[in-house]
Every structure is written in structure tokens, then in C-alpha cells.
Amino acid sequence: MTVFLTEKAEFRLRSFLQGSSPSDTDKGIRLGVSDGGCNGYQYTLDVANQSKPDDVIQQHGKVRIFIDPQSAALLEGVVVDFVDSMLESGFKFSNPNATDTCGCGKSFQAGDCTPTAVPCS
């Protein structure tokens, strides 16, 4: 299982973890997928105080990434980037497993296993 972070994404995610004490050695970013969005699946990205026993754990520079086993197959090979421009700012996902993506870039389909989509609001 491999997820890739660009230098910009790693820097930005590291900023969410700043302020942690040295005892917070297990703190990291939880990357996942949930049912929803306008194409069936949507990406989730949260700060996590610790990993769960069955998580896939990856280290990217100073950022630990926790991925639940249910999301792992859908995130295999994903590249996470951070863009900051006059028109948009945020994390972007390039997913080789996606068979279709939404114009918003926050949701995707992955073959026949994608749940029913919900229109963008």
C-alpha cells in the first residue's frame, strides 16, 4: 500500500500537526474514503491523535499517515498535492483507481464497487 505526498502537501499537513508535544509521537493524519460526494466516494483527511490497531501506517518526512484497511485498496497509488492559487486552494488527489472524478475534485468513482452518487450542493 503506497500513498504519495508532494512536498507542498507534506509541508501543509505538517502545519496541522505543529504544536504537538514530543510525547505525541503517534499523532498523524488520517487519510480515508467514505461513501458520498457527487461521484460515489469522497476523500477524508483528518488529524488523528493515534493510529488504530489495523491501520496501514506510512511515514512521509515528518508526517505519519494512517489509512484504514477498507480505504487502502481505493487509495493505492494516490498522489496528494496542495494547490494555492487565486481560483482555488486546498488538497488535490490524483487517484489511479478512479474511473471517473467530479469537477470539484473531492469525489470519485472506482468501477462497479462505487456506491450511489449524491449530487454536488
Image: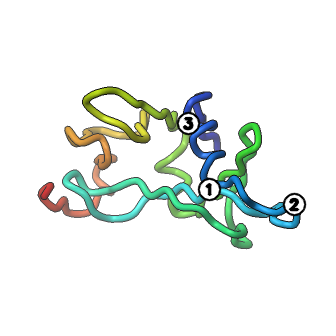
Question: What is the crowding at mark 3: few (fewer than 14 residues within 10 Å), some, or many (at least 20)?
Answer: some
Which image quadrant: the N terminus?
A: top right
**Residue 31: quadrant of the picture:** bottom right
Q: Residue at x 47, y 34 (%)?
A: 82
Question: What is the crowding at mark 2: few (fewer than 14 residues within 10 Å), some, or many (at least 20)?
Answer: few
Q: Residue at x 73, y 62 (%)?
A: 27
Q: Residue at x 59, y 62 (%)?
A: 47
Q: Secondary structure at mark 1?
A: strand
Residue 65 in the image, given as x and y percentages of width and height: 66, 52
Rendered image: mark on residue 29: 1
Mark 1 vs mark 2: in front: 2
Mark 2 vs mark 3: in front: 2
Separation of disc 1 and disc 3 at Cα?
Answer: 12 Å
Residue 46 in the image, given as x and y percentages of width and height: 53, 61
Residue 51 in the image, given as x and y percentages of width and height: 71, 67
Query: Quick one: label 2 or label 3, which is nearer the N terminus?
Result: 3
Q: Secondary structure at mark 2?
A: loop
Question: What is the crowding at mark 1: few (fewer than 14 residues within 10 Å), some, or many (at least 20)?
Answer: many
The kind of residue tagged 1 is Ile
Labels 2 and 3 touching (C-beta < 8 A): no
47 shown above or below 43: below
Which image quadrant: the C terminus?
A: bottom left
The kind of residue tagged 3 is Ala
Observer-nearest of 55 and 113: 55
The kind of residue tagged 2 is Pro
Q: Where is mark 3, residue-wise?
A: 9
Q: Residue at x 28, y 63 (%)?
A: 36
